[in-house]
Amino acid sequence: MKVENRRFGILGMARSGISVATKIKELGGIAFISEYKNETEIANSKQIKNTFQCEFGGHTIRLLNNDVLILSPGIPGNIPILKEAEKQNIEIISEIEFSFRIKHPHSKIIAITGSNGKSTTVSLIHHILQTAGYNSILAGNIGTAFSSYPIEKEDIDFVVLELSSFQLELIDSFKADVAAILNITPDHLDRYDSFEDYAETKFNIFKNQNANDLAIINMDDIISAKFTDKIISDLKYFSSNPKADIYSKENSIIFSSKEFSIQKAAIQGPHNIANMMCAILAVSPFNIENDIIQKSLKTFSPLAHRMEFVIEVDGIKFYNDSKATNTDSVRYALQSFNTPIRIIMGGAGKGEDYRSLIPHLKEQAKKVYLTGDTIDEMKKAFEGSVEIESIKEFEDVIKKAFFDSENGDIIVLSPACTSYDSFKNFEERGNTFKEIVSRLKK
C-alpha cells in the first residue's frame, strides 16, 4: 500500500488511532485524527495536537479531505460522516487492514477470534513461538496495536493477532496464514442487528484464505459449525470428541498420535483445555518440536483478570475474573471449581439473557452477590432460583461476601457484564477488586 504523500483520516484517538497515525507519519504520509470526545477528555491532547493535524468534539467534514479513512474498532460504521464518505467513494478501512497492507510479506499471521478465551490463546501461541526461537509479536485486541511494531521490516517471523468482531468488520484484503474461531456466544448484541450478524462478522477472519492456509474451528461449538461452508482453506477441528483433529482425554491432549500432558499446565479448567488445543493446532504447520510445546504449556504465565488467584484471607480464597464480561465466561468460571463458590456479578449489561446461567448457578454457586447497573435485571432473572443479595457499591459487595464466608470458601468476581458503569475498563475493575481484597488481608 502506498502511504507516502497520501492523506489518511483517522477516526478515534485511542491506542490504535494514535499508533496508526504515528506509522503513517513514519512512512511519509499525512495523518489527520478526528475525535468525538472533547479535548479536555483526552489524555495527552496537547502532545497529540503538537504532533498531528486533529480535531476534537465531533467528526466533521474535514475527514472528507482525505484519500483513505481508518476507523477505530469502537466506532460504529453507520455514523453520518462515514455514510457521506461512502457516497464520495472514499475508502474506509480498519487499523488491522491498513497494517496488513504495509507489513513485510515474510511475516506470517496467526489470527484468533471468539467470544471468550482469545487473549489466553494468542498469548500461549506467542509464548510457544518465542520458546521455539522465533521472533513473534503479539498485537490486536489484546492491547497493543498491530501498527505499533516495525511490521514493514522483514525480521518479524510471526504476527499473532487477537481480533474482535469490531476489528473484523472492515476486512478487505487481510489474510491470515492460520485463523481460528474459539467459540461464538451471544455478545455485543447492543452493536449488531442480530446474533447471526455478530457470528457472520466473526467468520470474516477466514476471508481471503486459500487451500494453503489453515482454518481452526471448535467442533463442540454449535454456532461455529453452522458457518463452516464459508471456509475454503484447510479446516481442522479441536474438541473433547476423539473424532476431532486434536482432542482432550483425561489429563492429556492427543494430536496426530502425539500426547501432551496437561496435569502441570499453567492454565487449568475445561475452557483452557480448549484454548491449549487451539494453540497447538495453530502452530502445527511450523514444525515445532513436541518438547517445546510441552515445555511452553508448563511455563506459560496466566493472564491477569482471567480466573486469577489473588490471595487467601483467613482461609477464604479470592479469584479475579474481571474479564468475564458475558454469560459464557461466567459458565466457564463456575465449571473451574470442584466445590460451590460465592460469586460476585453485575456491571453494565450488553443485552444478554442472564437466565441461561440459572442451571449452572444452582449447581455451582453457594450464593450470588449482585452489584452495578444490572442489579435489578439480574435479580429479576435469578430470584427464586438461587440465593442472591444485592449491594450497589463495589467495595461493600466484596466485604459482604467475605463476612458471609467461612474457612474453605471461594469468592470469585465474575461479572457477566462490562465494567463501564463504574470503571474505565475490566482491568481497572479487576485491579480495584485486588486492592480491596488486599485491604481485607491487612
Image: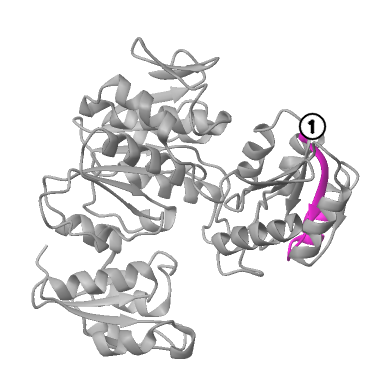
Asked whether 366 falls inside the magenta stretch, the response is yes
| Residue 217 visible to the viewer | no
Task: Say above or below: 159 vs 38.
Answer: above
Task: Say above or below: 292 vs 101.
Answer: above
Q: Residue furthest front?
A: 442
Task: Say above or below: 279 vs 82.
Answer: above
Asked whether 318 falls inside the magenta stretch, the response is no
Tell me the quarter of the picture where residue 109 sits. Answer: top left
Q: Position of residue 174 (x, y in %)?
A: 24, 51
Residue plotted at (87% across, 52% down): 403
Q: Position of residue 241 (x, y in %)?
A: 50, 16
Pick whichever, 344 or 421, lies toward us: 344
Q: Which residue is mark 1?
A: 363
Q: Residue furthest top?
A: 257
Residue plotted at (55% across, 33% down): 271
Asked which colour scheme the image uses, the reply is one colour
| Residue 438 visible to the viewer | yes
- Indicate left or right for 426 with 173 as reference: right
Pick the quarter of the image with the N terminus.
Answer: bottom left
Pick the quarter of the image with the C terminus.
Answer: bottom right
Residue plotted at (32% across, 59% down): 170
Q: Position of residue 251 (x, y in %)?
A: 53, 17
- Indicate left or right for 408 with 65 as reference: right
- Indicate left or right for 254 with 417 as reference: left
Tell me the quarter of the picture where residue 18 sits. Answer: bottom left
Question: Magenta segment, which residues?
Answer: 363-381
Q: Position of residue 111 (x, y in %)?
A: 32, 44
Pick whichever, 169 or 108, lies toward us: 108
Say what amino acid the circle numbered 1 marks. Glu
